Image (cartoon, rainbow, N blue to C red):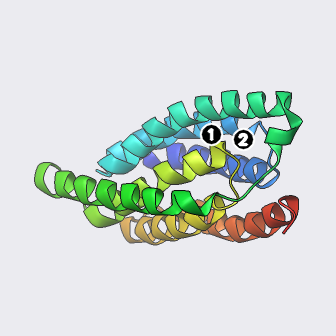
Amino acid sequence: MEIPIIEILGATIGLVYIFLEYRASCWLWIAGIVMSLFYIYIWAEVNCYAWALTYLYYLGANIYGIIAWKKHSANEAESIISNLPKKKYPLLIFISLIATALMFFLLRRYTDSHIPFSEAFSTALSVVGMWLLAKKYLQHWYVWLVVNAIYAIANVWMGLYFSAFLFTVYFGVSVLGLVRWRKLAGE
């Protein structure tokens, strides 16, 4: 298992990705595609199956993000960062809870995952977070604060220190990104 080299490469690309996300650059989606490929392998190798599936989802979400942001660029009014309408909160919370429960059940019953609840919860939130990002909703940063904290702590526990560092940086950048995007949204 050659995780350290692949983990270093994945984490490095991940740092580029978070920088581009912070800058609200459309290039974040390309970096996200490459990083996803690395982390699908990494998570599968350490028995974090939901996280591997999350990064498989990210492949598709990154492609969707390219298309959505390109469409937004064509219509300048739509390219502005905005707030998630409050009426969507209950549905997204419900989806997150149901997805967490379902994934936790599947991971506990059918896999040898070492961290089934952390995987299930962070995966459910990650799906929601990527959708929020693709729609340029400011609230995606709040979701990433929670997800990145979970990933950072879990990666330390699993001995994946480069990934733990990456997600610790992600957490910090999530704070900075939230502040920056709030300004861009006119708050």
Percent position (x, y) of residue 41?
41, 39
| Amino acid at dot 1 | Gly
Mark 1 nearby-residue class (10 Å; few <14, some 14–19, many ≥20) = many
Q: Residues at badges 2 and 1 in contact (C-beta under 8 Å)?
A: yes
Residue at the spot 84% in from the left edge and 31% down from the top edge: 75
Say which quarter of the image contains residue 112: bottom left
> Is residue 100 rendered to the left or right of residue 111?
right
Mark 2 nearby-residue class (10 Å; few <14, some 14–19, many ≥20) = many
In front of the other: 32 or 158: 32
In front of the other: 162 or 111: 111
**Which SS class for mark 1?**
helix
> Is residue 81 rendered to the left or right of residue 152?
right
Residue furthest to the front in view is 87
Say which quarter of the image contains residue 70: top right
Does the image show residue 62? yes
Residue at the spot 41% in from the left edge and 54% down from the top edge: 123
Q: Looking at the rendering, in which quadrant would you find the C terminus?
A: bottom right
Which numbered dot is residue 28?
A: 2
Residue 5, above or below 63:
below
Percent position (x, y) of residue 108?
16, 58
Say which quarter of the image contains residue 87: bottom right
Residue under label 1 = 32
Residue at the spot 53% in from the left edge and 57% down from the top edge: 88
Does the image show residue 2? no
Residue 37, above or below 12:
above
Percent position (x, y) of residue 169?
66, 65
| Amino acid at dot 2 | Leu
Q: CA distance from mark 2 to mark 1?
A: 6 Å
